[in-house]
Amino acid sequence: MLNLNLPQNLPTAAELPHSDDTPVDNELQELIPGLLKAILLLNWVERWDWFFGIDMGVYYHPDQPPIIPDGFLSLGVERYYDEQLRLSYVLWVEKVIPILTLEVVSANYRGEYSRKKTDYAQLGVLYYVIYSSQRRRKPRLEVHRLVDGEYQLQPENPVWLPEIGLGIGCERGTYGGITREWLYWYDESGNRLLTPEERVKQAETEVTQAQQEAREAQQRAERLAQRLRNLGIEPDSLT
């Protein structure tokens, strides 16, 4: 149950600052959450009970600055309210704590392994995901699950998240023409969900194969008709 010990006369999202004008440290902090959201939009297109925010303030108290994850997922909320979309994510309005937050570590740590980890645990975020492409000896992807108020590292890749119905993991792939390691969603069998680009290519391949099969079928029909004519049988007479 959401209990934030809030005062009365709470402000709305429109009355709260929705940008601190702080740029992201690197492009990955935008692209990695963007890819995860794009895959969800493709696979959950018929669902309206979820929201994935990117670099958006999460307000937990009107007198405190928001927490701003690189990405976060909430379930059981409206995907959008109106054409203006969300300015920020206000907990006393949404009444749902994000189930997952994501931090993409830049060259300079910003408290991902300390302050933010504590903040998310106190807030009650079930899964805290950290990705650091700079790591060499330790795993670049860490998925932490909140157990009795403390985060416990989950060792697998991908990690199955039963409360979400998806797994999350990392592997090499191509997104936006860039081949590198990306974060993806996975099904329960460990199969990676396709990106929008891959879905388009898959559809194009299926159309090409169908066209090829149609041409081959037409060619077989024409060869059969010619054999019948060689035997003195007019193919049209058989119908």
Image (cartoon, helix red, strand yellow):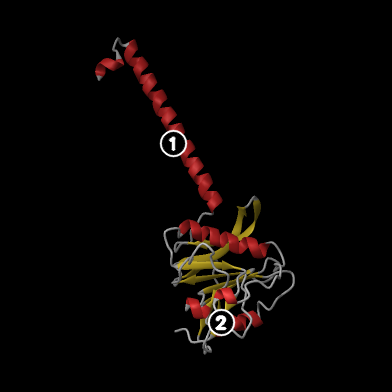
**Residue 39 falls left or right of residue 174:** left
Residue 175 percent coordinates (x, y): 61, 53
Picture residue at 48% right of the left edge, 76% below the top: 94
Quadrant (top left/top right/bottom left/bottom right) for the C terminus: top left
Left or right relative to 234: residue 101:
right
SS class of the residue under badge 2? loop
- What amino acid is at disc 2? Tyr
Residue neighbourhood size for the residue with mark 1, other residues' Cα within 10 Å, grouped as few (<14), some (14–19), many (≥20):
few
Q: Look at the picture and state if 200 lies above or below 22.
A: above
Residue at figure coordinates x 65%, y 53% from the top left: 179
Residue 219 can be seen, yes or no: yes
The amino acid pointed to by label 1 is Ala
Circles 2 and 1 in contact, beta carbons < 8 Å: no
Q: x, y (%) of residue 57?
A: 60, 74
Q: Which quadrant would the N terminus be assigned to in this image?
A: bottom left
Q: In this orientation, which residue lies closer to the viewer: 176 or 148?
A: 176
Residue 91 badge: none
Q: Label 2, on which residue?
A: 60
Q: CA distance from mark 2 to mark 1?
A: 53 Å
Q: Quadrant of residue 182?
A: bottom right
Examine the rendered structure and indicate whether residue 125 appears above or below residue 212: below
Question: In the image, which is nearer the foreground, mark 2 or mark 1?
Answer: 2
User: Closest to the observer: 89 or 159?
Assistant: 89
- Of the residues under marks 2 and 1, which one precedes in the sequence? 2
Q: Identify the disc placed on residue 210.
A: 1
Whole-percent x, y for residue 53 in the image? 56, 68
User: Can you tell which quarter of the image residue 220 is in?
Assistant: top left
Position in image of residue 60 (x %, y %): 56, 82
